[in-house]
Image: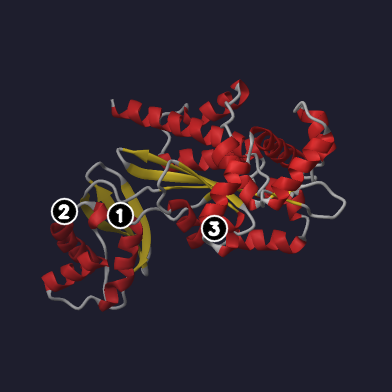
Amino acid sequence: MNKNKGQNDKKNMNERKKRILWAIVQDYSETAEPVGSRTVAKKYDLGVSSATIRNDMQDLEDEGYLEQPHTSAGRVPSIKGYRFYVDELMMPNPVTQEEQKVLHGIFEDSSKRVDEIFCNMAKIIASLTHTLSLSASAKGKSGKFNYVRFLPLDKLRAILLVVTDSGDVTDVVVKIPEGTDLDELQMLANKLNRFLHGKELKKLDEKTIMEFQREISKNLVSYIPVFRALNQAIMPSREIYSGGASALIEQPEFRDIERVQDLLNLLEERELLHRLLMESMDKPISVNIGTENNMKSFSDLSIIRAQFTCNNQVIGSIAVLGPTRMQYGKIVGMLNFMQKQLDFLLKDKDT
């Protein structure tokens, strides 16, 4: 029934109503002020009177595309209105020459690590769009296991080095288990090396470690912290890069100090943010508006998310968070541009 109602609403959406909705989204995204019929008539040259526009705005409100915050005020887009705008009316903005120059700077140094590129992406997209941007690279879990070794740090701790077949090195500080010493740790490392050598990192997990324990027929309970550190070295990075929190807080929607505090608390939820960034997507760029977001913490924000791939593997993700009146076309245009640039850079490195 709801589906049929939605289809009927779309049939009632003639070209003039579409242009009016488009104009209201554009104006409200710039001013954060409810939009009246006179404003639409003056600024957007639709060729009809403000009375006609007012009638169409009433229809759009009745159909759920607009809302009226106050009885004497103009209208603002609803979640449904924004969804129609994004799906049917929005065109990604072309990236200006000045913006291109700034964005190209992210990729100019081809020696940069992927995680460094994603860190810079978050900062630059935030500065250009005045939103909160988050990014993470899916580094780790690529290549094959070569060897692991321990280096002395002090009497209680050692540095665990994990080396892949391509020469990538990850290091983690571990506590030396009570009753053991560095020589015993290295003996364990030698056995691990024989057991894990040549295995793909992305296939290593706790089950593999249990198989190793059975293989050597030894109780390794005291070594659990060491194996946790080994998993940490192999698993993808949980590092979240962010930019633009201060700019977002300056938006009118965040004048309420409690809402600002909620946002700051949200930025501390690293696992939640990592799940948001690395959640699977069925298209390269997705737009979730307000209550469309699965996670309650994001129910009053819009999130535009882009994933970046290489050889059909996700290598990282960017999420742009802002109020529902964010500039969707501008942000989607920039994310499109960055996806193409990174794809070009990675292909160039492979040749």
Vertical side of 57 occupied by 329: above or below: above
| Mark 1 in CB contact with mark 2 (< 8 angstroms) | no
Which residue is nearer to you in this view: 124 or 162? 124
Vertical side of 16 occupied by 167: above or below: below
The mark nearer the N terminus, 3 or 1, is 3
For the residues carrying marks 1 and 2, which lies nearer the camera in this image? 2
Report the residue at 64% width, 57% height from top: 300
**Local SS, label 3:** helix
Other-residue count near label 3 (Cα within 10 Å), few / some / many at <14 / 14–19 / ≥20:
few
Report the residue at 62% width, 63% height from top: 265
Measure the alpha-carbon separation of dots 3 and 2: 57 Å
For the residues carrying marks 3 and 1, which lies nearer the camera in this image? 3
Per the image, the residue denoted by label 1 is 161
Q: Toward which corner of the image does residue 21 lie, by quadrant?
A: top right
Which residue is nearer to you in this view: 109 or 147? 109
Residue 197: numbered disc: 2
**Local SS, label 2:** loop
Residue 2: numbered disc: 3
The mark nearer the N terminus, 3 or 2, is 3
Q: Toward which corner of the image does residue 23 lie, by quadrant?
A: top right
Q: Position of residue 131 (x, y in %)?
A: 64, 44
Vertical side of 147 occupied by 344: above or below: above
**Local SS, label 1:** strand
Report the residue at 47% width, 53% height from top: 239
In the figure, is residue 75 to the left or right of 306?
right
